[in-house]
Every structure is written in C-alpha cells, then in structure tokens.
C-alpha cells in the first residue's frame, strides 16, 4: 500500500472520487437537491426592488449578517436600465429563519435615514458587494470585516473595510484584471495561510462584443489582500466550456480542506421560439428585450462544483438548482443565484431532529414586483452521496492513513437496509457490526478490535450497503 493518502482525522466527503477506487466500487455517486422552504425576506422597501440580488451571509459570534444590493432593474415603463441608484443593504438573524432589517441611520434615502442601507452611490457606483470576516490573526481590528465590489467609476475591484461589519469605508484597489459585474468572493484560507478571491471575467470574445464571449470564473491569491496574482481560469479538466456566472465559492465549514461552489449557469437562446410564447410571463419577457435581447432570451440555473486546491474543480453538469415549475416570474435570466453562506438551522419537521443546512436564493428577478429571498434546506454534508440499491453495493477506497480510535459516519438506511464497514491493513482486518438507521454521527462498532489498532497505517476501507446512502466519514 505505497503512496497512501494521508487524511489524519479530517472529515472526508464524496464530492469527488479522490479517495475512491472506482474500478472496485459498485455504489453510485449522486448529486442531491435542495428542498424549498419559506420566504425568508421580502424586499418591499422603496430602496430595494426587483433587482435585489447578490446576497451574502456572514456567521459572526451567534449572529448572521446579510448583505445584498437594493435596486429596481427597470423603470415603470420598462424602457431604461437603472444602475446608478444601487445601494447596499443589511439584515440580520440569530437563527437563519427570522430576519430583521434594522434602521441604521447611515445613508439618506428619500430625505430620511430610517433604513437599512449601509452604502450608496456617494461611496461608489456599485454592481455587487460581498463581505467576509477576516480570520487572519494579523488582520488589524479596523479591517476585520472586508468587502469587495466593483466601482463603475474606474472599473476596478475595490476593497472596503469595517471594524463592526456595518460601517464600511472604501479602502484600496485590488485589481482591474476582470469584469467583476457579479459577486466576487474572497476569504482567508486558514489551511493555506493566504487569501483567495474568485472573480468574474470572459474569454473567447468575438471582436469587441465581450458580452458575446463565454462568461467564466477566475481565481487569484494574496498574502496581504493588496497585492494579487494574475487571475487564472478555473480548471474543469475535460468538462464542457459553457458560461458560468456567480460562483459562490466557500470553504466547507465541516471540512475546510474542501471548497464548495454553486455557480449559476448562463444559457442564452439564439432566438425567440414558440417555447417562449408558452411561458406565462411571455409579455414581460418581450418588454425586457426592449432593453437588451438577452434579458428575454437568457435563462439561468445552478450547478455544484468542488475542489481540494482551489484551482482544479470537479463539476456536476446536471443542475443542482433549477427555476422549478413555470409561473409568470421564473425561467428568466437571474434565477438560481444562491446566496453565499451555509447556515445550520433547526429541523422543520421535529424539534429534536438533527440540524439541517440552510441556503438561500432570490426569486422574482426583474418582475417589477419586490424580489423575495427563499430559504432552502439540505442534509448536513448532503450535497453528494453514494447510493446503494436494495441489491448490495460496495464502496472501496484507495489506501489511506488516518489518525484516531473512533470512526463516525453520516449515513441513512431503510428499515431493511444496512451498512457494514471493513478496514484492512497489510496484516490485519477489522469488520463492523451491521449498521442501520439515519444519523449524522453514527459510531461504527467493530467486532474484532477498534480503529486505534490501525491508526497511522495504510488501510483500505470497504463499505457494503443495501438500500442506503453514505455522505461522509471521519476518524476521531
């Protein structure tokens, strides 16, 4: 078992096949979907509107801070694209379900400061605003909260800084190598000890019409958040080169060596077809085309991608999120733009059930009605799983080295289904009892020893399952 993968005691998920011996594995890896829940926020304030988008949620010492743009995409007679009046708004929650928009008294709107606006056009001509709490131990307190946004006055991506997460100042230019007219995500990578930033750009641009090029995502790095490397396109291997919009890249909080991304996929149809006539919102779609044809011909969904180094990505081409059943205000350009941030929330089914992961996405894009932010849920670690049919299936890993004396699994079976685990080193094998149930943290009990006997040695893990799903595992 040479060249064994060292996983120590980190949590491993099945977002890629990094640990899997695919030739010996018969269980099927599957992408799981979000479940829609209630509307978390209605953007019905006069300074908000149907263009409210690019939501970003920051977990901060028992409080969730939300940042988003407020603006109206089209004026009442649907003839003008409005961008000069974009403002940055703030909301907060203690549980991820009930959100308030506090009156902050920072910016004036309509002759009053009774609003939740934290930045307006007096600071910059915004088209996005992203915030993160900087966990770099060398970060000055006055820069603990950092924001990124394009300023259309000079087309640079700018850094904004704040001590309290509410009052931001325009601080310094980051780069002008990109387009930046979507949410540009940055964070301090605690494992790599550097900053990472994922930005928007285009490639294969015909002539000077960059909007006809292919939208892409690029990454760059920095030691100080001021000097940045040249942005490079993400590497999807042999994956199809299709347009991607917002990226929503973030380290996964339960396995920070893994990055998750939820890019919106931009699909622009070449012409109006009878399928568009059949949509309930066909008339308003045609009106949007008066501003630009792509505002009626483009539609968007969302895919899931993951990475272990931030550069090379494993991407599912099957949609992670779709616009859903047709109604007058969906299947448009702007659907399926998830907010940055995953929140553990209490179960909606039972008060004593395990927490779920909540994510959020806007709906009602450019509908001339207040945009709404809907909450969605998924099982913790549940974006991707291995699924076994009733007929038993097997998952076999490559050799790896772990540390610890307890194996915990996130799994689910039917009443008749089961899971069994076998750990085999060069000279010893231990086998578990039959496991059944549905748990985020089930201790695997072995009949002939415990995992501490094999800790620090190369092992192969073999999981036999029937009518079951396997999401993640961790040695403690």
Image: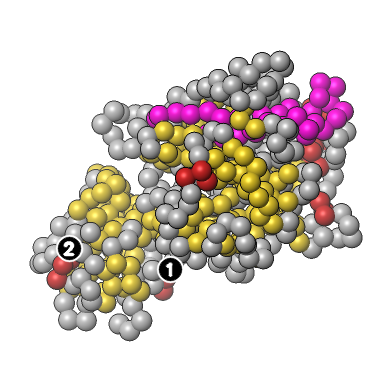
The magenta region covers: 66-95
In the figure, 435 relative to 98: above or below? below
Instruction: Please tell me which residue is depicted at 33% across the width and 84% down the height of the picture.
Output: 2
The tag on residue 93 is none
Q: Position of residue 71 (x, y in %)?
A: 71, 29
Asked if one can make out residue 252 in the rendered structure from this viewpoint, the answer is: no
Residue 81 vs residue 86: left or right? right
The tag on residue 18 is 1
In the figure, 317 relative to 323: above or below? below
C-beta proximity under 8 Å, tags 1 and 2? no
Which residue is nearer to you in this view: 342 or 144? 144
Q: Is residue 74 magenta-colored?
A: yes
Q: Is residue 256 magenta-colored?
A: no
Q: Position of residue 67 (x, y in %)?
A: 57, 35
**In the orientation shown, which residue stands out farthest toward the left?**
448
SS of the residue under disc 2: loop
Label 1 neighbour load within 10 Å: few <14, some 14-19, many 20+: some
In the figure, 170 relative to 309: above or below? above
Which residue is nearer to you in this view: 42 or 15? 42
Q: Position of residue 277 (x, y in %)?
A: 80, 33
Image quadrant in which you'd find residue 115: top right
Instruction: Please tell me which residue is depicted at 36% across the width and 81% down the height of the picture.
Output: 3
Q: Position of residue 358 (x, y in %)?
A: 44, 37
The tag on residue 405 is 2
SS of the residue under disc 1: loop
Asked if one can make out residue 59 in the rendered structure from this viewpoint, the answer is: yes
Figure quadrant of the C terminus: bottom left
């Amino acid at each position: 078992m040479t060249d064994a993968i060292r996983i120590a005691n980190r949590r491993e998920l099945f977002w890629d096949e990094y640990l899997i011996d695919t030739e010996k594995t018969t269980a099927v890896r599957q992408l799981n979907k979000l479940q829609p829940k209630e509307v978390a926020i209605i953007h019905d304030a006069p300074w908000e509107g149907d263009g409210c988008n690019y939501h970003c949620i920051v977990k901060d010492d028992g409080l969730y801070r939300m940042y988003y743009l407020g603006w109206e995409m089209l004026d009442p007679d649907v003839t003008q694209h409005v961008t000069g009046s974009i403002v940055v708004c703030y909301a907060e929650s203690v549980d991820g379900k009930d959100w308030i928009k506090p009156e902050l008294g920072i910016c004036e709107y309509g002759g009053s400061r009774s609003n939740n606006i934290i930045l307006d056009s007096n600071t910059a001509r915004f088209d996005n605003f992203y915030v993160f709490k900087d966990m770099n131990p060398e970060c000055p307190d006055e820069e603990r909260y950092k924001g990124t946004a394009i300023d259309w006055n000079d087309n640079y991506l700018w850094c904004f800084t704040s001590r309290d997460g509410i009052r931001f100042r325009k601080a310094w230019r980051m780069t002008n190598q990109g387009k930046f007219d979507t949410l540009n995500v940055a964070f301090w990578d605690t494992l790599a000890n550097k900053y990472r930033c994922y930005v928007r750009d285009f490639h294969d641009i015909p002539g000077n019409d960059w909007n006809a090029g292919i939208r892409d995502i690029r990454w760059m790095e920095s030691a100080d958040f001021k000097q940045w490397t040249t942005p490079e396109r993400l590497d999807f291997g042999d994956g199809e080169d299709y347009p991607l919009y917002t990226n929503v890249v973030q380290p996964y909080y339960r396995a920070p060596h893994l990055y998750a991304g939820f890019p919106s996929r931009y699909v622009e149809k070449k012409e109006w077809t009878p399928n568009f006539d059949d949509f309930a919102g066909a008339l308003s779609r045609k009106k949007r085309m008066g501003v630009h044809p792509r505002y009626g011909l483009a539609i968007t969904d969302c895919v899931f991608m993951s990475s272990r180094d931030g550069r090379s990505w494993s991407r599912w081409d099957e949609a992670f999120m779709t616009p859903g059943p047709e109604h007058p205000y969906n299947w448009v350009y702007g659907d399926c733009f998830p907010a940055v941030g995953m929140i553990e929330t209490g179960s909606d089914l039972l008060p004593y059930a395990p927490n779920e992961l909540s994510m959020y996405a806007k709906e009602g894009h450019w509908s001339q009605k207040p945009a709404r932010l809907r909450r969605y849920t998924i099982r913790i670690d549940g974006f991707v799983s291995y699924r076994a049919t009733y007929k038993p299936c097997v998952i076999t890993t490559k050799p790896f080295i772990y540390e610890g004396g307890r194996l915990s699994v996130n799994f689910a079976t039917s009443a008749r289904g089961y899971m069994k685990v076998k750990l085999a080193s060069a000279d010893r094998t231990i086998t578990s009892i039959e496991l059944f149930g549905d748990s985020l943290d089930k201790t695997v009990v072995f009949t002939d020893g415990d995992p501490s006997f094999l800790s620090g040695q190369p092992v192969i893990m073999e999981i036999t399952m029937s009518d079951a799903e396997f999401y993640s595992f961790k040695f403690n």
